[in-house]
């Protein structure tokens, strides 16, 4: 049985989510803020509101992703912030999905199950990959070029992993979006292109190994 944490300061929303989760076969625990989050048993997934007392959702997300113990824990943001900027910010910081309020309970349950499926696939991933001068250690969340560490955002890391895992294959933007971001949203093509551009810059001379296949997508190597 998967353990889900719901961090939501609105008691009525929190209780509704906990009730729905338990009725759908999950174990669920609610928190009104993030004070006790890091002293609790590691959950299978975290539902995280942005507007919270004390540390807000962005701050907690950053702490989760920078903590070795919780870095791999999937996180779904729950928020009334609906701008593309807020959504992209959360995803780039490592959120696995972004659910806008008000939301349907069954849609939320469906998204939770989808993220848990992707999380299970990630646990089965090859842990170490390399392509020419580029090396990647998934467990350590480490990328090096010529043995020099390269700092990447969570999404840049996942994007590079997907390219390295499928080196030599042409990957469409739809495939990249589905695998790395896990769902569709407006501006998806621009989002992928921007991440490819910043990834190339950070990889320096080896960024040229990422090839643009016009009208289709991208490929690492040939």
Image (cartoon, rainbow, N blue to C red):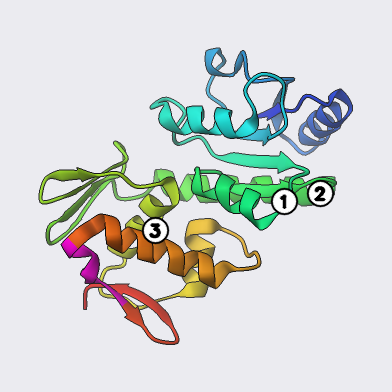
Q: Up-down: is 91 above or below 1? A: below
Of the two numbered discs 3 and 2 on the same chain, state the one appearing first in sequence.
2
Horizontal arrangement in the rendering, residue 40 relative to residue 24 (left or right): left
Q: Which of the image's four quarters has the N terminus? A: top right
Query: How many residues crowd around disc 2 within 10 Å: few (fewer than 14), some, or many (20 or more)?
Result: few
Q: Which residue is rendered at x = 33% and y = 64% of the image?
A: 163
Q: Residue at x 40, y 46 (%)?
A: 153
Gap in angstroms between the C-alphas marked 1 and 3: 24 Å
Query: Is mark 2 in CB contact (under 8 Å) with mark 1?
Result: yes
Residue at (66, 41) in percent of width and height:
77
Residue range highlighted in magenta: 205-211
Say what secondary structure mark 3 lies in.
Answer: helix
Q: Mostly what secondary structure, the magenta segment?
A: helix
Please tell me whether mark 3 or mark 2 is closer to you in this view: 3
Q: Secondary structure at mark 1?
A: helix
Is residue 117 in view from this perspective? no
Instruction: Indicate the quadrant containing the C terminus: top left, top right, bottom left or bottom right.
Output: bottom left
Between 191 and 20, the one lying in front of the other is 191
Position above or below: 171 against 38 = below
Q: Is residue 148 magenta?
A: no
Residue identifier under label 2 = 106
Residues under labels 2 and 1: Cα distance? 6 Å
Please state which of the two labelled residues, at mark 1 or mark 3, is closer to the viewer.
3
* Numbered-mark total: 3
Estimate the x, y position of residue 155 in percent, counting from the top left: 44, 52
Measured as percent of width and height from the top left, residue 182 is found at: 56, 58
Horizontal and vertical percent for residue 136? Answer: 24, 49
Residue annotated with mark 3:
159
Mark seen at residue 60: none
* Residue that mark 1 sits on: 110
């Amino acid at each position: 049985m998967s353990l889900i944490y719901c961090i939501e300061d609105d008691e009525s929303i929190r209780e509704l989510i906990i009730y729905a989760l338990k009725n759908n076969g999950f174990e669920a625990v609610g928190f009104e803020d993030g004070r006790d989050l890091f002293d609790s048993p590691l959950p299978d997934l975290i539902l995280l509101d942005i507007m919270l007392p004390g540390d807000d959702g962005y701050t907690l997300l950053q702490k989760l992703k920078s903590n070795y113990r919780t870095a791999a824990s999937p996180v779904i943001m729950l928020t009334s912030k609906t701008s593309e900027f807020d959504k992209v910010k959360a995803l780039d910081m490592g959120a696995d999905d972004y659910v806008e309020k008000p939301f349907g309970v069954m849609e939320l349950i469906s998204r939770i199950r989808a993220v848990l499926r992707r999380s299970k696939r990630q646990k089965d991933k090859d842990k170490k990959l390399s392509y020419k001068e580029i090396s990647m250690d998934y467990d350590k969340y480490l990328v090096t070029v010529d043995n020099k560490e390269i700092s990447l955002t969570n999404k840049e890391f996942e994007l590079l992993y997907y390219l390295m895992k499928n080196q030599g294959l042409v990957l469409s933007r739809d495939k990249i979006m589905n695998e790395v971001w896990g769902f569709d949203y407006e501006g998806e093509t621009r989002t992928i292109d921007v991440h490819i551009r910043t990834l190339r810059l950070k990889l320096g001379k080896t960024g040229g190994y990422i090839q643009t296949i016009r009208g289709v997508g991208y490929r690492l190597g040939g």
